[in-house]
Image (spheres, helix red, strand yellow):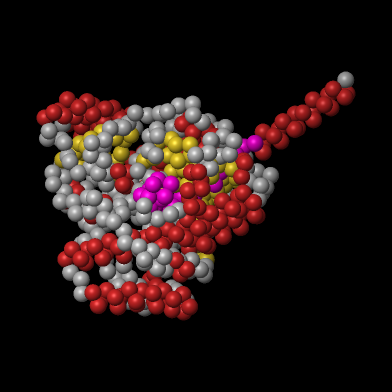
Amino acid sequence: MIRILALVLSLVVVCGLHAQTSKPNIVFILTDDHAYQAISAYGSQLAQTPGIDRIAREGALFRNSFVTNSICGPSRACFLTGKYSHINGYKVNEKTFNINQPVFPEQLQQAGYQTAWIGKMHLDSIPHGFDYVRVLYSQGHYYNPVFIDKQYQPEKQSGYVTDIITRFSTDWLDQRDSSKPFFLVVGQKATHREWLPALEDLGAYDDKEFPLPPNFFDNYIHRAAAADQDMTIDKTMRLAEDLKVHVNYDKANDYNRMDSAQRRIFKAYYDGISEAFDDAHLTGEALLKWKYQRYLKDYLSTAKSLDRNVGRLLDYIDSHGLRNNTIVVYASDQGFYMGEHGWFDKRFMYEESLRTPFMMRYPGHIKPGSQVDGMVLNIDWGPTLLDMAGIKPAAAMQGQSFAPLVTGHAKDIRDALYYHYYEFPQPHHVHPHFGLRTKQYKLIRFYGQLNSWELYDLQADPQEMKNLIQDKKYAKLVKSLRAQLATLAARYQDQEVVNLLAAEK
């Protein structure tokens, strides 16, 4: 009897240990403004990204991953809360995230996880739910940035920001409590404007001529909001600040923080660019095309360090015995324009900013090379990670788990997505709008100073150049989509939109 009891007790202990250690670790790499068009796993012809592609090759690539509000801080707030901006209260950048609301890392903590956020957070506050925080102050800087801890104490670091964030992340992994599963957000600043590459990547794409997007010279016909924005490469992109032509190194904060060795290398490269620009005497369309080429060269050179550091982090995970029990996610806070419609930046509900890269690796659970076509949202990220960790997502979260998509048990979790953007008029004069996207159609309603509707057939017009809203052939479809939009607004408790649509009936 004693032997049987001892055996039972030992099995209980073993099972308990197994239950504890079988919870997956989670590493979530969250980048800034990294366009899916610039990632070779998505078929990009602009650049090769072997580090990032490795996650897709060894896991799943999501082809229809979208955001609910295409702007940096609000996107992170949606990720943390699993709720739309109108519910979590963080609608526009440069505000303060309300930390007195639930965030999903708190549920991970309660389940025994050790949690950390390292790198860019950009919420002007430190949310609950993290045991360790070492984040960039505000937007952060590419060179010699300042980090803050949970007590908001500043600490200046020497070096290039992408390298530093990766080093801080692996240092924390070395020092963590190894008896607990962990959740780590690696928040990279790259590839945010003004696109300052690492020193070793300066000129990485100088021998390449990039093709213009087919709609680079968009005339915005029948799209009033697109015509009224302030985010074109032609008029908005600045020669000095964005493209580093004749930079004032003493006055510009991004440059006067460099040490003498960094500045010498950086200045030598861009002084050469400035001299060549002066010699060319460019005007008109030739100047616009030159700006586009310089934009992509700087953007993609900045992304080169990002990709290299993703590879370093994966190497660390694999070489430290963490590979098989660690979910690795790569995502951006939203998409970005790489010259489509003549633009840079994000915000609009058009595909390039609405769609965000997302890939996930979890050996033994996700088949390598998987392709996920079902539509997912950034409010789904938290519920999914909780679900995969065996934790029931909080009922108040508006997102839903897409774990069935990665395991192959489902093809779709929704037939349409809902979107709402707010920030206006600054900094890019993109009018507030909301809308829905189905697999084939997109309906957008701009409101406020500019009131207009837009409809696109994404199969026939993937570049979203032809607004069909006035085409009588689509009248019945528009009516159906408007009803579906009203239903989604009500489901997600967006009362402002519910009221506006009700008033228009």
Q: Position of residue 220 (x, y in %)?
A: 16, 49
The answer to which quarter of the image holds residue 265 is bottom left
* In the depicted structure, whether residue 229 falls above or below residue 16: below
Whether 392 is drawn above or below 147: the answer is: above
In-front residue for pair 321/294: 294
Q: Residues in magenta?
A: 22-44
Residue 42 on the magenta span: yes
The quarter of the image holding the C terminus is top left
Residue 3 at x, y percent in the picture: 87, 24
Q: Residue at x 36, y 66 (%)?
A: 207
Picture coordinates of residue 210, whole percent (x, y):
31, 58
Residue at position x 42%, y 28% from top?
411
Residue situated furthest right in the rendering: 2
Magenta region includes residue 299: no
110 up-or-down from 242: above or below: above
Q: Quadrant of the N terminus?
A: top right
Viewer-side residue, 16 vs 243? 243
- Residue 275 visible to the viewer: yes
Q: Nearer the viewer, residue 156 or 23?
A: 23
Instruction: Please tell me in which quadrant of the rendered image residue 396 appears.
Output: top left
Q: Is residue 152 visible?
A: no
Residue at image point 48% right, 63% down: 161
Residue at coordinates 23% horizontally, 36% vertically from top-left?
Answer: 460
In this picture, residue 391 sits left or right of residue 62: right
Name the spot of residue 195 as percent of width and height, x first.
37, 63
Q: How many marks?
A: 0
| Residue that extends furthest to the top in the rendered view of this protein | 1
